Image: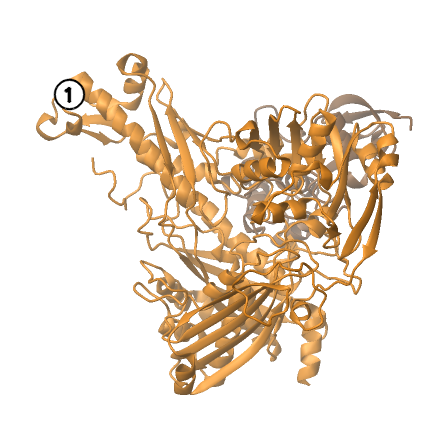
């Protein structure tokens, strides 16, 4: 099967790749662009470990085809920090011990960042429902929710 | 040097520093199982049985082999022959022999130049099956007339006359239960069932394997124990253990489910045949169909109690179905069942039953949560009937130091009474309940484990330290190792780097299981640091020209003591390491042993449940975990273990289950249908860390990972039963089961 040529932007960098029409955006990110921060936990859009944004919209990259990235702006966990400065969410996740094994962390950070861009002052319930598409099996979510709320507070105070 | 005295005042242990691998894990750079690549790498795919039980008549691989891009196809014929015991069981599970024993059992595998091609090629492998009768339910598998899954699988422990699917038997206890029941004012006997659940780690099994015809290989995999993987892969491939170097990737959750091998030997076999590296990654459906769920259970419990709450006798029968292989942890279920209570008369029986399901694997305190569900439900019934307070009854009967445990030995220092007192005094226990809510409590017990442990600690010239441990870091153990090393050495936490060594660079290590890592690798780290300190004191003594035993170690410095006190300026660690090459050579500390003092663990959970009688849906508005940690090395990660155990228990109690159709096929093999708790399902989970030091660890540490999943099933069942006004006997307490129970109750 012939491959498709795609031109896109990933974390601000212009990027080209060839992909099989059946390959997902997650496959492309991981296997062709070596951006392995997004994880495949299910491949069916149920776990959120592959969360990225496309033109600012939060998606499961396992449910998007690589070819659909044409002309879009993709943002992954690798683009969250600003050089050597961590995003407040990243710092708060470490400070609050909001990760145990860390496999869900990239997806949750991408999803939480997307939430705070839309709603800088979410309630606990709003955070819980926004993150309901991101499975974590280790933490029971308690410290994740606290880290997101704390990061939101810090970001509001800084702005 | 009084290094072996138990410490009680700490500088670093008990603080909450950032974990050393935090940056890697919040930036996406941490490398997990599926994140590795190798030059010339192929991709593997596995063909699995669609039948619950079928004889494999013929496998035709010719079409797959002819496909462009396909480099190797393997079947059971490509593995070692003549294995026995657990090696044989693991091999049978990894790749079926004559018979497919469950839906999802691996039958063949293929490697190709792309993952898509491998998947397409797998579909071209033609397998002819002769379908056999199957059974998936534990009670049905034991019943007369049930299909025999593996003739001759039973060992000598099984009593005469049992069905051949009963493969092991356990019996233990002490006293005279009949006499005890006769002394009771009330005896309640009841039966309970639990369905199998999956560990549900978010990272599927993944590996990258490279093996040559010369028998030398490399394996990268997500595992709780890479020495276990090394030993089993070598046996299954027929190569020498030391010729296979295994590196553990970062691990995306395990909970017991990554204590064995599944795809790793298959990837190695494909690599050997293709003579190229092979990457193999499971899909979520493969994880659910073919890797270790828990056992399902059927249990009968009988307990006698006096009006004042004293338990006079207890007995239990625990039947565990563990898939098509021996090994369901029924002896743990039996032994843990009554461990929280000081009983004069106790008797427990366990049956290990095989059925056409995947081989069970450990899941956090394997076997104990189900026992607690049955036992603590009956205790709750007795409390309700006799009008007694559930915490006071448990306090009255609680095991303490010196109690002869239900499973035999006498307890040393344990913290159950302290946990129960903390529960009684916690504001949660006395908070008012709203309409439609019920409150449940439960105790929980787990043994904890020591296990073979090797640690190497090497000093650098600048006075910093590298610690090599062999237990994969599942939830922050690098932080706890660094804290214990810094406490022992008296140097900052940041000056220590902890690495998970591969099998070629450190001695043997048992798996990260049994809540053993902080205990055993921690003890080993402390002992290795003490060995390095002894050598540093020796170097200082030589420099000062005084006896070695006249030097002590204080706050990261060698200090002259006794008659020489004050004679010399203290030598800081960096002063000693700076010229160690000239004073006797590199300084390292080692520890290689099997620590035996793991120290058992108890916990108590309090939970409020709200049941909607219209829909049968349960919500959990409040949850509190109280558990003895011995000494919490990094309290934030201890709390995390408590909260994670509770959350998994909530899933097990309310929603998670393996659903098999009449055809013996798993019907819910995706996360949409096998639904684990999401953030909006749960409340904040409050924690209380009780610290009753473990006499078997220099800093008093007990493992904390597993006990947290023991009480939730029972605590939630007690809360739901009180909220709904009807006793629940079967897990999960999903809305249809609750509605059915309410209806049956009228």
Q: Quadrant of the N terminus of chain B?
A: top left
State which chain disc 1 sits on: B
Instruction: Tell me the quarter of the picture where residue B392 sits.
Output: bottom left
B667 or B651, which lies in front?
A: B667
Q: Is residue B555 above or below residue A49?
A: above
Instruction: Tell me the quarter of the picture where residue A63 sits.
Output: top right
Q: Is residue B461 left or right of residue B222?
A: left
Q: Which chain is brown?
A: A
**Can residue B423 be seen in this snapshot?**
yes
Q: Residue at the spot x=33%, y=29% of the render?
A: B491
Q: Quadrant of the C terminus of chain B?
A: bottom right
What number of labels is visible? Answer: 1
Q: Residue at the spot x=81%, y=25% of the render?
A: A8
A114 or B279, which lies in front?
A: B279
Q: Which residue is mark 1?
A: B568
Applied colour scheme? by chain
Where disc 1 sits, the SS reads loop
Q: Is residue B459 above or below residue A117?
A: above
* Image x and y of residue B249, in percent: 58, 34
> Which tint is chain B?
orange
């Amino acid at each position: 099967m012939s491959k498709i040529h795609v031109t896109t932007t990933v974390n601000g960098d212009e990027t080209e790749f060839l992909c099989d029409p059946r390959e997902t955006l997650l496959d492309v990110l991981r296997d062709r662009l070596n951006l392995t921060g997004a994880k495949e936990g299910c491949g069916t859009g149920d776990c959120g470990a592959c969360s990225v944004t496309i033109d600012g919209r939060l998606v499961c990259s396992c449910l998007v085809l690589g070819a659909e990235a044409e002309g879009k702006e993709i943002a992954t966990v690798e683009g969250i920090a600003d050089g050597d400065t961590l995003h407040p969410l990243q710092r708060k996740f470490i400070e609050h011990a909001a990760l145990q094994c860390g496999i869900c962390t990239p997806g949750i950070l991408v999803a939480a960042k997307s939430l705070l861009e839309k709603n800088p002052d979410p309630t606990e319930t709003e955070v819980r429902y926004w993150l309901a598409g991101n499975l974590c099996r280790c933490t029971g979510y308690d410290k994740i929710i606290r880290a997101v709320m704390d990061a939101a507070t810090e970001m509001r105070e800084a702005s | 040097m009084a290094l072996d005295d138990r410490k009680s005042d700490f500088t670093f242990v008990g603080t909450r520093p950032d974990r050393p691998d935090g940056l890697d894990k919040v930036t996406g750079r941490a490398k997990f199982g599926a994140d590795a690549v190798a030059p010339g790498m192929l991709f593997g795919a596995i063909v699995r049985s669609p039948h619950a039980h079928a004889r494999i008549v013929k496998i035709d691989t010719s079409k797959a082999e002819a496909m462009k891009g396909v480099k190797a196809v393997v079947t059971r014929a490509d593995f070692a022959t003549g294995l026995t015991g657990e090696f044989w069981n693991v091999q049978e599970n990894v790749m079926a022999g004559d018979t497919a024993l469950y839906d999802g059992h691996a039958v063949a595998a293929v490697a190709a130049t792309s993952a898509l091609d491998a998947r397409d090629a797998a579909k071209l492998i033609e397998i002819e099956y002769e379908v056999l009768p199957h059974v998936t339910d534990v009670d049905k598998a034991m019943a007369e007339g049930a299909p025999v899954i593996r003739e001759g699988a039973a060992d000598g422990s099984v009593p005469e006359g049992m069905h051949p699917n009963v493969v092991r038997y356990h019996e233990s206890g002490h006293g005279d239960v009949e006499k005890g029941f006769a002394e009771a004012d009330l005896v309640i006997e009841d039966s309970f069932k639990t369905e199998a659940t999956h560990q549900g780690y978010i990272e599927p099994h993944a590996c990258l394997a490279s093996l040559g015809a010369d028998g030398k290989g490399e394996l990268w995999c997500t595992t709780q124990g890479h020495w276990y993987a090394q030993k089993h892969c070598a046996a299954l491939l027929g190569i020498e253990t030391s010729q296979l170097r295994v590196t553990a990737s970062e691990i995306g959750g395990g909970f017991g489910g990554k204590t064995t091998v599944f795809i790793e030997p298959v990837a190695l076999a494909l690599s050997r045949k293709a003579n190229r590296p092979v990457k193999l990654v499971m899909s979520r459906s493969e994880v659910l169909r073919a890797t270790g769920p828990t056992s399902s259970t059927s249990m009968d419990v009988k307990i006698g109690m006096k009006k004042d709450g004293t338990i006079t006798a207890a007995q239990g029968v625990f039947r565990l179905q563990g898939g098509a292989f021996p090994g369901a942890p029924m002896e743990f279920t039996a032994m843990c069942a009554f461990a929280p209570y000081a009983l004069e008369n106790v008797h427990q029986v366990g049956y290990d039953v095989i059925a056409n399901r995947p081989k069970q694997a450990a899941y956090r305190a394997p076997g104990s949560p189900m026992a607690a569900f049955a036992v603590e439900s009956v205790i709750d019934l007795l409390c309700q009937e006799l009008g007694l307070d559930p915490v006071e009854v448990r306090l009255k009967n609680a095991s303490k130091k010196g109690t002869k445990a239900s499973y035999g030995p006498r307890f040393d220092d344990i913290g159950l009474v302290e946990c129960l007192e903390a529960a009684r005094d916690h504001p949660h226990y006395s908070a008012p309940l709203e309409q439609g809510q019920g409150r449940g409590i439960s105790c929980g017990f787990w043994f904890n484990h020591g296990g073979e442990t090797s640690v190497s600690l090497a000093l650098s010239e600048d006075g910093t330290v590298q610690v090599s441990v062999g237990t994969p870091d599942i939830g922050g153990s690098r932080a706890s190792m660094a804290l214990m090393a810094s406490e022992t050495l008296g140097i900052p936490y940041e000056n220590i780097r902890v690495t998970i060594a591969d099998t070629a660079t450190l001695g043997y290590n048992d798996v990260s299981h049994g809540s053993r890592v902080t205990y055993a690798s921690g003890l080993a780290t402390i002992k290795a640091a003490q060995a390095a300190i002894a050598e540093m004191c020796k170097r200082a003594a030589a420099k000062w020209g005084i006896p070695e035993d006249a030097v002590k170690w204080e706050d990261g410095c060698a200090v002259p003591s006794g008659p020489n006190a004050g004679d010399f300026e203290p030598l800081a660690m960096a002063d000693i390491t700076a010229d160690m090459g000239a004073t006797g050579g590199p300084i390292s500390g080692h520890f290689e042993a099997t620590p035996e003092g793991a120290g058992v663990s108890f916990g108590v959970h309090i939970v409020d449940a709200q049941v909607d009688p219209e829909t049968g849906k349960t919500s959990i508005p409040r949850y509190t975990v109280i558990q003895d940690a011995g000494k919490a090395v990094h309290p934030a990660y201890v709390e995390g273990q408590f909260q994670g155990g509770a959350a998994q228990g909530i899933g097990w109690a309310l929603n998670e289950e393996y659903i098999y159709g009449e055809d013996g096929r798993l019907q819910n093999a995706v996360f949409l249908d096998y639904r684990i708790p999401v953030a909006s399902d749960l409340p904040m989970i409050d924690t209380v860390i009780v610290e009753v030091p473990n006499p078997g660890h220099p800093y008093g540490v007990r493992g904390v990972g597993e006990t947290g999943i023991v009480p939730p099933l029972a605590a939630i069942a007690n809360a739901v039963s009180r909220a709904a006004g009807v006793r629940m006997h079967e897990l999960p307490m999903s809305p249809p089961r609750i509605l059915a129970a309410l209806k049956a109750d009228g």
